[in-house]
Image: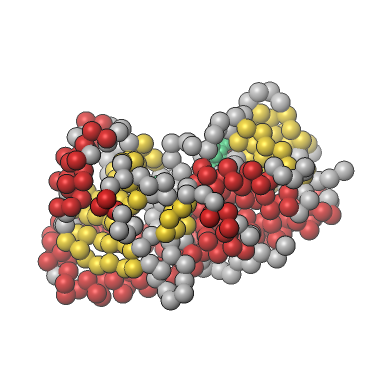
Amino acid sequence: MKTQVVIVGAGPTGATLALLLVKQGIAVKLIEASRNFHRVFRGEGLMPSGLDALEQMGLLPMLERIPHRSLDAWEFLILNRLLFRVDEPMSVGGKPTTLVSQPAFLEALIEEARTYPNFEFVQSVAVQDLVWRDERVCGVKLSDERSISADLVIGADGRNSIVRQRANLAIEQQSQTFNILWFKLPDSQLFESENVFYLILNGDRAFSLFRGSEGNIQVGWTLHDTSAKWKQIDWSKMFASVSPTGLAEYFRQNAEAIERPVLLSVVVGCCPRWYVPGLLLLGDAAHPMSPIRAQGINMALRDVIVAANHLVPVLHASKYTGIDAALSQIQAEREPEIVRVQELQKEELTQGQLLIKSTLLQSIVSQLAPLIGKRIRQSWLKRQHLLRQGVTKVKLTVE
Ligand SMILES: Cc1cc2nc3c(=O)[nH]c(=O)nc-3n(C[C@H](O)[C@H](O)[C@H](O)COP(=O)(O)OP(=O)(O)OC[C@H]3O[C@@H](n4cnc5c(N)ncnc54)[C@H](O)[C@@H]3O)c2cc1C
């Protein structure tokens, strides 16, 4: 009998791993709680490291069939003045950061996996618990009372992972936890000529704005306090008051179209241990990522490559000792990159917070922008290298 793998969660981690494994002839059941992939919010930014992971998996042509668009540039504005701009791609011959419609991407992955008879997609039902035998995980219990047996369970159920909780794998949470309000607004001619990712700082107000893969304008507003005061804010007035003229006009014109935002609580951390016998955590379930510089999907895709390299041979061999030994090797290979990337994200956050906390510093930087912008740009670019290319070498060895 074939080794049975159960993957919990069909986000970027679960769906890509399922496809890689079924292509290798391994039996996979992928369980997804939500009814469709158009949940309120899914990140879209793929860095060159994530695009490279997709290329290695043979999945880049898939992007051509789904909504995606590359970024043309990044612009940093302080007190309505341009501090610096960086064009994409940032290296000669490199890939530009690309926004990819995540619902369409996940649907395409599942569609392809369905063409393999050893794949089963169990949708609209949540995993509630794990099944254990002799201190080894041997399956999952679903919310509809069903149980599914497995030789290996992969927890790819995101940052609030129930699999992680049921396996008693605690997470060490970092202090870079904050909240973001996410808005989707109508497209405008203003963004037609080029797709710029704006980072805007004005006093204690900080937000980012870009044109998403499906053509709407996405705004991520950083919330400093945990109260619900934001619900009373007139957002078109607020956005317009902290934006340069062209953007301010856009917000005023679209005042009616600004709907209530989605509140996203950012959790950042890493599990000291990603596995127990019979179970492995991957992606955000093992190491929830901050949205800073769009790292989470990229790290998830790189986790998947390393996991496939280690798992495919032992899953074919079908011996529990081999499978369980591979789990610690996967963590050992992936953890150094995750730790480093989370440190780099924290450095980015600390730089931003330093400016947010001091309006005096903002005003000095803004006034001196023509003089010091170039130097700040250089030092920002230097920090981006690892965040764009990845820290360790990740190469898919199973074809
Ligand atoms: C505001 C914000 C913006 C972000 N922007 C970006 C970005 O632009 N680029 C980037 O690379 N990263 C971004 N990230 C991070 C990124 O979203 C995550 O790192 C990435 O989605 C992790 O993928 P995953 O598959 O591990 O988990 P998820 O994407 O969270 O997927 C988990 C899946 O599991 C399902 N699930 C959950 N519980 C159960 C259960 N009990 N049973 C069955 N299914 C279950 C969920 O429905 C979901 O489909 C952002 C994060 C935030 C908070």
Measured from the top left, where is residue 39 in percent x and y?
47, 36
Residue drawn at x 63%, y 67% as measured from the top left: 395
Residue 84, above or below 34 = below
Residue drawn at x 70%, y 61% as measured from the top left: 309
194 or 263, nearer to the observer: 194
Horizontally, residue 233 falls left or right of residue 63, namely: left
Measured from the top left, where is residue 125 in percent x and y?
62, 29
Residue 199, above or below 14 = below
Quadrant assignment for the C terminus = bottom right
Residue 276, above or below 233 = below
Res. 266 visible in picture = yes
Quadrant assignment for the N terminus = top right
Measured from the top left, where is residue 298 in percent x and y?
51, 57
Residue drawn at x 58%, y 33% as measured from the top left: 33
Residue drawn at x 67%, y 49% as measured from the top left: 19
Q: Quadrant of residue 99?
A: bottom left
